[in-house]
Amino acid sequence: MDKLIELASTLVSGACIAVLAAWLTNRSRNRQEQQAEVGALRVQADAMMVAVAELRGAAAANRLLWEGPAERARTFLLTVLAFTGGAARARIAGGTDVQSGLVGFGGAAELLSRERVANKQAAAAVREPLTRAATAAAPLMHCSDTAVATATEQLLTALAGVEDTARLDAALEAFGRAVNAATAPRLPWWTRRRSGLAE
């Protein structure tokens, strides 16, 4: 009888140890997977932040180089000078007033055409950072945390109107809060329970 009790206790303790080992193994595996997901989310969020910074920089440079009042005044002045220079050359070559005016308009049109091409090239430079931002946002849009996915979608919408800096700043702040909440370490259940009881 003693042998039976000893055998039963050995079987029960072996089963308890096996169950505990399986539980610890699953818990460890789940924790590693969770840490890997958090690490990936941080990397993706960092890529998104870099893409947003690049886009803001490209838009600011574009605005500074092509859209400011000083730049418009410069373009106007250069156009007037091109018109005057072309008209003067035609007059010196013996052209009539109409011919001088046409040559002047041709010079101004040529200058404006070059300015327009350069402006479009500068605007196209914004497209590349915008593409990088959309590429960085793609995995975040499929994040299991709905707050991160929603904040990413709002950030992409705000990026479409990069000139509206207040809206972009608000969307960027909401994105940061969502990512921080998703990557914050989870407290153990007993700590969460204790804080729930304290409240």
Image: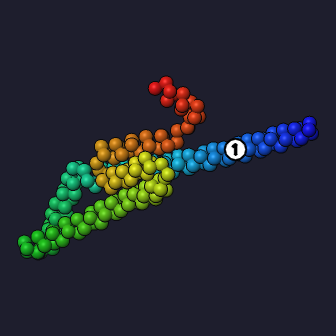
Left or right of 5, for residue 131 = left
Task: Please state which amino acid type lies under the numbered disc 1.
Answer: Trp
Left or right of 50, for residue 60 = left
In this view, the residue in front, 96 or 184, is 184
Q: Quadrant of the N terminus?
A: top right
Q: Taking the image as drawn, is residue 181 in sight?
A: yes
**Please, what secondary structure does the residue beneath circle 1 have?**
helix
Picture layout, residue 16 above or below residue 48: above
Q: Taking the image as drawn, is residue 132 in sight?
A: no
Expressed as whole percent of the image width and height from the top left, the position of residue 42 reads: 53, 46
**Which residue does the image show at 19% across and 56% down from the upper left?**
77
Expressed as whole percent of the image width and height from the top left, the position of residue 11 reads: 83, 43
**Which residue does the image show at 29% across and 61% down from the upper left?**
119
Expressed as whole percent of the image width and height from the top left, the position of residue 107 reads: 20, 68
Expressed as whole percent of the image width and height from the top left, the position of residue 113 reads: 25, 68
Determine which residue is flagged by label 1: 23
Picture layout, residue 100 above or below residue 151: below
**Which residue does the image show at 11% across and 75% down from the upper left?**
99
Within 10 Å of the Cα at label 1, are there few (<14), some (14-19), or many (20+) other Cα atoms? few
